[in-house]
Amino acid sequence: MSSAVIEKKQKRKTDRELNSFKAVFPSRSANEGFARMLTASFVSQLDPTVSELADIKTAVSEAVTNCIVHAYPDSVGEITLSGKYYGDGQVVITVKDKGKGIENVKEAMQPLYTTDSGGERSGMGFTVMGAFCDRLRVSSRLGAGTSVTLTKKLSRGE
Ligand SMILES: Nc1ncnc2c1ncn2[C@@H]1O[C@H](COP(=O)(O)OP(=O)(O)OP(=O)(O)O)[C@@H](O)[C@H]1O
Ligand SMILES: [Mg+2]
């Protein structure tokens, strides 16, 4: 098991949970857009700013793309997207796969680190997720799968 966290603010105590969702879909590229829209609809209930919404959508896209491209490179597997939000405006989104896993998460999260040899990837996905959220936690087990948890506190929370 390997895991790492990028955190901007000190951990705050968690407020009451107001709403949640969970969706399971195959790792087909069409579902990157689906995951973005689903997350956007869910988060929109909290009246986010345009930039907060864009940040969350971008981070979710990166996480889901990683499942499609890296977790299941030669097959179609299951992706589970779930979300929760709390009374203080904190949003927590989790993207999980049961794919090939990451041996060293800390290394994989370094800017420009990529295992892609085709020159198509820049190795910036985790860096983008970390920059656009307040907290990014990644945990993974080789051969078993990866879980990415994105946390962002919206400014219009109570
Ligand atoms: N869900 C996953 N399953 C297995 N490996 C993953 C997963 N997500 C990321 N990785 C590994 O971590 C590396 C870094 O991921 P990151 O998203 O930062 O860069 P990238 O996907 O290679 O490039 P980019 O996101 O810029 O297109 C990947 O190259 C891959 O080896
Ligand atoms: Mg990526």
Image (cartoon, grey):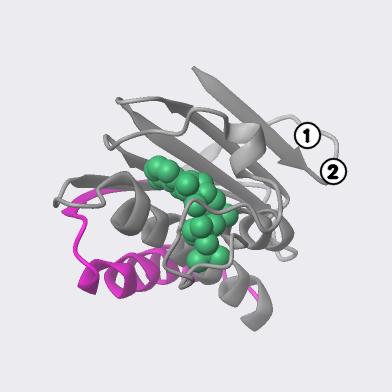
**Which sits in the foreground, 123 or 50?**
123
Answer above or below: position of 63 versus 102. Answer: below
**Residue 109 location, x and y as percent?**
64, 45
**Residue 71 location, x and y as percent?**
32, 45
**Residue 23 location, x and y as percent?**
24, 50
Query: Given the image, on which type of amino acid does mark 1 rest?
Result: Arg
Residue indicated by mark 1 = 12
Residue 46: image quadrant is bottom right
Answer above or below: position of 57 versus 103. Answer: below
Tell me the magenta residue range.
20-49
- Residue lying farthest bottom? 50
The numbered disc on residue 9 is 2
Report the side of 22 relative to 75 (left or right).
right
Q: In which quarter of the image is the C terminus?
A: bottom right
**Crowd rating for badge 2 (residues with CA inside 10 Å; few <14, some 14–19, many 20+):** few
Answer above or below: position of 117 versus 101. Answer: below
How far, Cα to Cα, is label 2 from label 1? 8 Å
**Which sits in the foreground, 131 or 16?**
131
Residue 26 colored in magenta in the image: yes
Report the side of 98 relative to 26 (left or right).
right
**Crowd rating for badge 1 (residues with CA inside 10 Å; few <14, some 14–19, many 20+):** few
Helix, strand or loop status at disc 1: loop
Tag 2–tag 1 contact (CB < 8 Å): yes
User: Which residue is at a point 18% across and 52% down the rendered structure image?
Assistant: 74
Query: Given the image, on which type of amino acid does mark 2 rest?
Result: Lys
User: Which residue is at a point 49% across and 51% down the rendered structure image?
Assistant: 115
- Residue lying farthest front? 117
